[in-house]
Amino acid sequence: MRVPLSIGIGKRTLDLLGDATGGVIENPFDKVLYWLIAPGAAVAWDMSRLPSIDVWGATAYIEVPPAARTTGPGVHWRVPLRYDRYLTDPVALLAALRTATREALGPREEAHR
C-alpha cells in the first residue's frame, strides 16, 4: 500500500493506527509511506474514494531497507518490523485511510458517497 506524505494522509494514517500498525517503510525521496498487508487483502477495496493511494500487488518492487535502518537519509523503516507483527490488519488500515483522506481532502470527498 503506497500512501503519500505530501497531503497529510500518510502521517494521519499512522496516528490513527497507533500501535495497531505493522511495519511501515518511508521513502523520503518520493514522499510516500508503504504499509505491508497480505497479498490480495485489498482486492475488493474501492480505490476511487482513496485518491493518491495505490495498492501494489505481490509482484511490485519496492526498496526494502535493512531491518536496523530506522532513520534517514534515504529509505528507512518509519515503523520498524516487530517479530510479532510485520503486516498491518487490512480492515484497520482501510478505516484509517478513509478517515485520513476525508480529513485531508475535506467535504468534497463526502459528496461522492
Image (tube, helix red, strand yellow):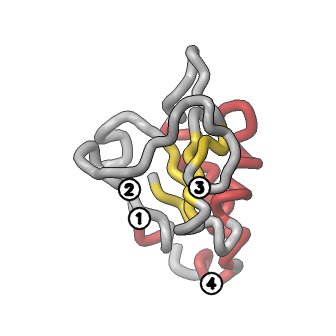
Q: Is label 2 in a helix, a strand or a loop? A: loop
Amino acid bearing label 4: Arg
- State the image quarter where residue 19 is shown: top right
Q: Is residue 97 left or right of residue 60?
A: right
Please, what is the three-letter code of the amino acid marked with disc 3? Gly
Q: Position of residue 31 (x, y in %)?
A: 59, 67
* C-alpha distance separating marks 2 and 1: 8 Å
From this viewpoint, is residue 44 visible?
no
Residue 20: image location, x then y, percent: 66, 32
The answer to whether marks 1 and 3 mark residues whose Cβ atoms lie closer than 8 Å is: no
Looking at the image, residue 8 lies above or below residue 72: below
Rounded to the nearest angstrom, the CA distance separating label 2 from label 4 is 22 Å
Dot 4 corresponds to which residue? 108
The percent position of residue 61, horizontal first and vertical second, equals: 31, 51
Q: Amino acid at mark 1?
A: Met
Q: Which mark is residue 74?
A: 3
Q: Amino acid at mark 2?
A: Val
Q: Secondary structure at mark 1?
A: helix
